Image (cartoon, rainbow, N blue to C red):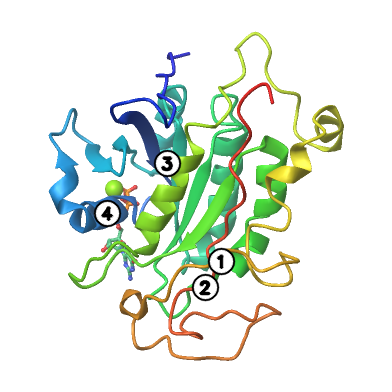
């Protein structure tokens, strides 16, 4: 297993060096999302270390985004990067309903890998400009996201976005907001379990052995009443992020927050970063 680079604590001088993997099915928009983030932070882009990588300064972090190809044959190579990663961005084509089950299986496989379990994951619900795009609420259900992240103790946030947009850039871009959350969560993420002691198999038995497991998600993935008892932080309105087609519309399947309903993107879903190891 590749050694995980230590991230200096927030109080330490100098930038914290963080490696984030960008994964997801082919055509999900991974490269587009990275380009979008690069455009938004144009003045903070650092010289590139290797092809397929993007280096950026984000607040006090020096971030390397590793763009991993999502084609079926390429996915087996992802795991060789897991050990060095502090967190992951999983990009999803929210409008590709035909491949949602494939995406769920891939996400499940990623999260249950011993070198990923426990690390924070930002799920970018991309292509929200497409008319058929599912909302975060619906994606949480379709992907069984609560169960997945609970079983694997991975802090998770889902953020709706549309990478293919006009040139307007701003700090409130959803992908960027999600990235900042990921960076805050990543340094506190528990170190991957040692190879000699893999975590117990997911499921109720594993949950019993880890009393804090339910804390990782319940009530915080989404701000709608179906997923949360109390309102959570929401993204500030960013009308430019969405196409005019997405005007107010009737709520779907019990989730009251629709794209564009309040002039912005539905609430981002976050839950508290994990406690430091040993807490
Ligand atoms: N409508 C729409 N199209 C998008 C969006 N983001 C990306 N695309 C398009 O989706 C296609 C795939 O985007 P990529 O960024 O190449 O996808 P990828 O995930 O990097 O794909 P692989 O590298 O093959 O794994 C391109 O045609 C993009 O223009 C979006 O937010 N909305
Ligand atoms: Mg790509």
Mark 4 vs mark 1, CA separation in Å: 20 Å
Q: CA distance from mark 2 to mark 1?
A: 8 Å
> Residue 1, percent across and down?
48, 13
Label 1 – label 3 distance at C-alpha: 21 Å
Eye-nearest disc, 2 or 1: 2
Q: Which mark is residue 183?
A: 3
Q: CA distance from mark 4 to mark 2?
A: 20 Å
Q: Are marks 3 and 2 in contact (CB under 8 Å)?
A: no
CB of residue at label 3: within 8 Å of ligand 1? no
Locate residue 238 relative to residue 184 in the image: left or right: left
Residue indicated by mark 2: 266
Q: CA distance from mark 3 to mark 4?
A: 14 Å
Residue beneath disc 1: 136
Whether pointer 2 and pointer 1 mark residues with C-beta atoms closer than 8 Å, the reply is yes
Q: Residues within 10 Å of mark 1 (few under 14, many from 20)?
A: many
Q: Is mark 4 within 8 Å of ligand 1?
A: no
Rendered view: 15 above or below 180: above
Quadrant of the image occupied by residue 170 = bottom left
Q: Which mark is residue 10?
A: none
Q: Marks 4 and 3: in contact by CB < 8 Å?
A: no
Q: Quadrant of residue 178?
A: bottom left
- Residue 222 placement, left or right of 238: right
What residue occupies the far top of the structure in this picture?
Answer: 196
Q: Secondary structure at mark 3?
A: helix
Q: Nearer the viewer, mark 3 or mark 4?
A: 3
The mark tally for this picture is 4
Going from the N terminus, do you reach mark 4 or mark 1 first?
A: 4
Q: Residue at x 60, y 28 (%)?
A: 276
Q: Can you tell which mark lies on residue 37?
A: 4
Q: Is residue 25 at all visible to an observer of this figure? A: no
């Amino acid at each position: 297993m590749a050694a995980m680079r230590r991230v200096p604590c927030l109080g330490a001088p100098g930038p914290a060096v963080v490696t984030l993997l960008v994964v997801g099915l082919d055509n999900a928009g991974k490269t587009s999302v990275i380009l979008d983030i690069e455009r938004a932070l144009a003045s903070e882009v650092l010289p590139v270390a290797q092809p397929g990588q993007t280096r950026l300064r984000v607040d006090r972090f020096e971030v390397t985004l590793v763009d991993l190809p999502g084609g079926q044959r390429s996915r087996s190579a992802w795991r060789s990067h897991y050990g060095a990663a502090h967190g992951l961005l999983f990009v999803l084509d929210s409008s590709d309903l035909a491949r949602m089950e494939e995406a769920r299986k891939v996400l499940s496989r990623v999260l249950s890998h011993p070198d990923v379990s426990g690390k924070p994951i930002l799920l970018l619900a991309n292509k929200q400009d497409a008319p058929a795009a599912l909302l975060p609420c619906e994606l949480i259900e379709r992907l069984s996201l609560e169960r997945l992240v609970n079983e694997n103790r991975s802090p998770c946030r889902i953020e709706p976005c549309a990478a293919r947009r006009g040139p307007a850039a701003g700090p409130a871009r959803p992908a960027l907001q999600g990235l900042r959350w990921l960076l805050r969560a990543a340094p506190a993420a528990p170190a991957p379990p040692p190879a000699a002691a893999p975590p117990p198999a997911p499921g109720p038995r594993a949950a019993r052995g880890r009393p804090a497991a339910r804390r990782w998600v319940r009530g915080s993935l989404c701000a709608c009443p179906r997923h949360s008892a109390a309102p959570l932080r929401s993204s500030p309105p960013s009308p430019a992020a969405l196409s005019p087609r997405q005007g107010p519309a009737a709520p779907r399947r019990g989730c009251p927050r629709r794209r564009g309903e309040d002039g912005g993107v539905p609430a981002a879903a976050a839950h508290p970063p994990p406690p430091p190891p040993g807490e």
